[in-house]
Amino acid sequence: MQITYYGHACFGVKVNGKDLLFDPFISPNEKASAIDVNTIPADFILVSHGHEDHVADVAAIAKRTGATVVSNFEVITWFGQQGIENGHPMNHGGQWKFDFGTVKYVNAIHSSNMPDGSYGGNPGGFVIQSDEGNFYFAGDTALTLDMKLIPETGIKLDFAMLPIGDNFTMGISDAVVAAGFIDCNNIIGMHYDTFGYIVIDHDDAVRQFQAAGRSLTLLNIGESKEL
Ligand code: NI
Ligand code: MN
């Protein structure tokens, strides 16, 4: 699988030839000004919750690419009202088999409303299983014991994107514990540095994961990595 970082909590992951795009927030993100949002490929746009810093570019990219938007029922209903008809609604604990693999919508401890203040359902994360490998996109979340359910239900993760910026989500030390809960050594950091509240010390973050015997990767915006 090839993973590309578009800044904040936005990643593209190529799975079985399909482009999955998570939480697109690019055009309002000054740190991602070098990324041309009009060239990002997407067959599926997976949206963890309704906050602006996760949905800002969903409608434009969905309209351009015809991608299927996957999220909770309320987020999909809201996008339907915006004219994005190609949605796949889910809810917590449910999974669905797509052509690239299986998506499970899992719990996140956070909040969720849409940019216009509409109800955004309950926030979540995604577990993706495919014959190319398995990974977890946590979304915005606190450390929660629910993360233990991923290995408990027999899912062996190859890598995971975890928020590490603190203040709005878990911070570095809780994310180290989360890596243990999900039993995953290969962690990609997200939701850091974009705003003043979530600026982190990169070296300290990498060191804390190392001390726990785990690896933290902090991708540059625009950087791709084969996993
Ligand atoms: Ni949020
Ligand atoms: Mn956020």
Image: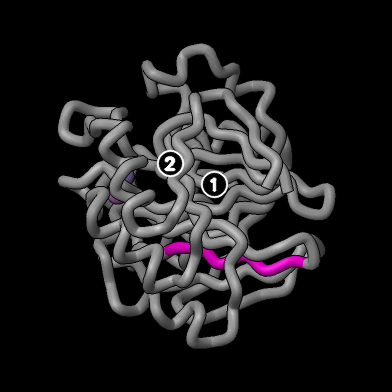
Evaluate if marks 1 and 2 touch, with contact meaning CB atoms under 8 Å apart.
yes
Q: Can residue 44 be seen by looking at this rendering?
A: yes
Query: In this view, which residue lies farthest toward the bottom?
Result: 153
Quadrant position of residue 56: top left
Q: Which residue is mark 1?
A: 22
Q: Which residue is mark 2?
A: 9
Residue 70 locus on image (x, y percent): 58, 58
* Ligand 2 has an atom within 8 Å of the beta carbon of the residue at disc 1: no
First along the sequence among labels 1 and 2: 2
Apparent side of residue 37 relative to residue 92 in the rendered image (left or right): right
Q: Can residue 76 be seen by looking at this rendering?
A: no
Image: magenta residue range? 125-130
Q: Check if residue 127 falls in the magenta segment.
A: yes
Towards the viewer: 83 or 161:
161
Q: Residues within 10 Å of mark 2 (few under 14, many from 20)?
A: many
Total labels: the figure holds 2
Apparent side of residue 125 relative to residue 45 in the rendered image (left or right): left
Residue 167 locus on image (x, y percent): 16, 46
Towards the viewer: 185 or 137:
185
SS category of the residue bearing label 1:
strand
Say which amino acid is labelled 2.
Answer: Ala
* Ligand 2 has an atom within 8 Å of the beta carbon of the residue at disc 2: yes
Quadrant position of residue 212: bottom left
Whether 107 is drawn above or below 16: the answer is below
What colouring style does the render use?
one colour
How would you classify the magenta stretch by its main secondary structure? strand
**Residue at left offset 31%, top offset 57%:** 175
Q: Quarter of the picture for ligand 2? A: top left
**Residue at left offset 57%, top offset 72%:** 104
Q: Check if residue 19 falls in the magenta segment.
A: no
